[in-house]
Amino acid sequence: MLKRNLFNLFNILMALCETEVINQIKGLPEYKDIDKKLDLMMLLKAIKKIVYTGCSDNILVKHYKAMAHVSFMSLQQERHEENQDFREQYTELRKVCSAQQGQGKGNTAQIKSHETNT
């Protein structure tokens, strides 16, 4: 029963990922071990690492930085949007923009995710 639940959860997590992320996960040296043991914590760590470090998206860094700043400067609360939701979106965009100022390359995956959410 436990093995079946782990297998189902493993498949759900993989199904929620985009194909590029899935390909990067399957390309990891520890993927066979993760798949064999159905180690969900290692899978989540791998997904987190890939999504938040943006391994292959360093080509358009300047574009993503500019788009993050444009999104931040044009951020408006929608008509039926809760105050808490707007505040969370504002603080996340603010973190992305302030992190870019301290870094030379920036975190493109994080910037891209905020760009698509707005």
Image (tube, rainbow, N blue to C red):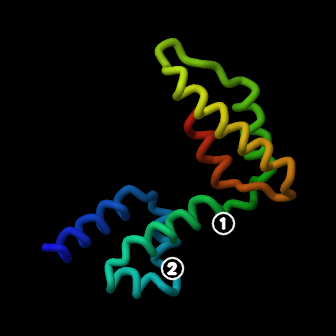
Task: Give the residue at the far top of this rendering.
Answer: 79
Identify the residue shown where x is 63% and y is 40%. Answer: 115
Q: Quadrant of the N terminus?
A: bottom left
Left or right: residue 86 compared with residue 80? right
Question: Residue 16 sits in which quadrant?
Answer: bottom left
User: Above or below — where is 25 with respect to 68?
Assistant: below
Q: Tell me the element at label 2.
A: loop
Q: In the rendered image, which residue does mark 1 sit on?
A: 56
Residue 30 at x, y percent in the picture: 48, 85
Identify the residue shown where x is 78% and y is 49%. Answer: 99
Q: In the rendered image, which residue does mark 2 sit on?
A: 27
Left or right: residue 5 compared with residue 12? left
Left or right: residue 74 compared with residue 87? right
Q: Nearer the viewer, residue 13 or 62?
A: 13
Image disc number at residue 116:
none
User: Above or below — where is 59 with respect to 84?
Assistant: below
User: Above or below — where is 41 with respect to 115?
Assistant: below
Callout 2: 10 Å neighbours few (<14), some, many (20+)? few
Q: Quadrant of the C terminus?
A: top right
Residue 80 at x, y percent in the picture: 47, 15
Residue 92 at x, y percent in the picture: 65, 40
Question: Residue 91 sits in which quadrant?
Answer: top right
Callout 1: 10 Å neighbours few (<14), some, many (20+)? few
Task: Give the residue at the far front of this rendering.
Answer: 84
Query: What's the amino acid at mark 2?
Result: Gly
Left or right: residue 36 compared with residue 19? left
Query: What's the amino acid at mark 1?
Result: Ser
Q: How many discs mark residues in the rendered view?
A: 2
Q: CA distance from mark 2 to mark 1?
A: 13 Å
Residue 35 at x, y percent in the picture: 35, 81
Identify the residue shown where x is 87% and y is 58%. Answer: 104
